[in-house]
Structures are given as C-alpha cells and as structure tokens.
C-alpha cells in the first residue's frame, strides 16, 4: 500500500514540489517543506518528511546526493533537492512495485546484528587506541628532533655572532 500510494503521489504531484527524474529511474522532492505540509497528508496520516524517508529506506530506497565535482557545477536552485532511487521504482512501470519488499528481521537476526556491531566497535576502539599511542610516540620523537635542531641552530647562531664581533 505504501509503495502504491507513493507511486501515485509522485505521478500526480505538482512538478514544482516533487516529480520523476528526467529519465524516470528516481524521483525528486524539490521542496521538502511544501511536500511535507501539503502533499504527504493527502496520501498518509502524517506530514513528517523524515518518517516518509525512513519508510522508503525500509523498502530499500537510497537517497541520491548530487554533489558537484567542481564549484562551478554547483547549482543553488537544485542543491536542496532530495532524490530517492530504487531499481524497481520507475515511472510508467507500476507493475514492478510488486517486486519491492519491505525489509524484515527476526529478533535473533537483530540481536546478532547488534552483537556484530558491538564487536566491530570494540575492534575500532582498539585501533583508535593503538593509533593514538603511535601518534603520541611520533609526536614526541618529532618534538625531540625539533628541539635538538633548534639547539644546534642556536649554537651555530651564537658562534657566528661571536665571530662577527671579533675585530679583523
């Protein structure tokens, strides 16, 4: 039901608020505030764009970011657009909607996922600790070398200053 409503919502929406992309393989929300306040409530029991986006994520949709490679490519007009993509969500192909399934996880899978993430966090914390130790050691070595070079240069300066003060 959610996918069907979303499909029809994009099809019928004012194109200045949301529309299909030029080639129809994703849809673009051009004005998030207006979309949330005027379009969403017509199809759903809320006007919360974040909830809508989260629901899309459950169905495997991905947000597409249009990050310009060059500053000259930046378009302020489209910078706030939000694009959503799913390979089976395409303009003029409502028959593909049946192939999109909502992700579900059993409690055991969710617990395994959490345990796996906890293990990864532990490994990352250990890596950070090791890197911090290595960084501190390298910094101390660099500081020592820096101070040694300063002392050498200072001694050389004093020697040169003394030699310049001697009468010829």
Image (spheres, helix red, strand yellow):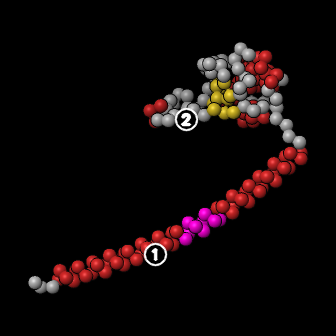
User: Which residue sits at x=80%, y=24%?
Assistant: 99
Q: Which residues are magenta?
A: 129-137
**In the rendered image, which residue does mark 1 sit on?**
144
| Number of numbered markers | 2
Q: Is residue 63 visible?
A: yes
Mark number displayed over residue 135: none
**In the rendered image, which residue does mark 2 sit on?**
67
Q: Find residue 94 and report its image quarter.
A: top right
Residue 103 position in % (x across, y down): 82, 35
Residue 81 position in % (x across, y down): 60, 29
Closer-to-camera residue (137/162): 137
Q: Is residue 102 left or right of residue 29?
A: right
Q: CA distance from mark 2 to mark 1?
A: 43 Å
User: Which residue sits at x=51%, y=31%?
Assistant: 76
Which quadrant: the C terminus? bottom left
| Mark 2 Cα shell of 10 Å, populated few (<14), some (14-19), many (≥20) | few
Vertical order, 24 against 53 (above or below): above
Magenta part mainly helix, strand or loop?
Answer: helix
């Amino acid at each position: 039901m959610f996918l069907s409503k979303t499909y029809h919502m994009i099809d019928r929406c004012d194109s200045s608020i949301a529309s299909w992309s030029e080639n129809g393989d994703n849809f673009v929300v051009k004005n998030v505030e207006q979309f949330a306040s005027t379009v969403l409530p017509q199809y759903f029991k809320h006007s919360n764009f974040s909830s809508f986006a989260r629901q899309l994520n459950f169905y495997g949709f991905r947000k597409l970011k249009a990050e310009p490679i060059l500053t000259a490519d930046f378009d302020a007009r489209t910078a706030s657009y939000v694009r959503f993509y799913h390979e089976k969500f395409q303009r003029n192909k409502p028959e593909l909607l049946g192939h999109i399934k909502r992700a579900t996880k059993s409690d055991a899978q969710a617990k395994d996922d959490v345990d796996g993430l906890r293990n990864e966090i532990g490994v990352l914390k250990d890596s950070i600790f090791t890197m911090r130790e290595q960084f501190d050691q390298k910094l101390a070595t660099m500081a020592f070398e820096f101070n040694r070079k300063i002392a050498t240069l200072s001694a050389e300066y004093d020697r040169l200053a003394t030699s310049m003060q001697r009468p010829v």
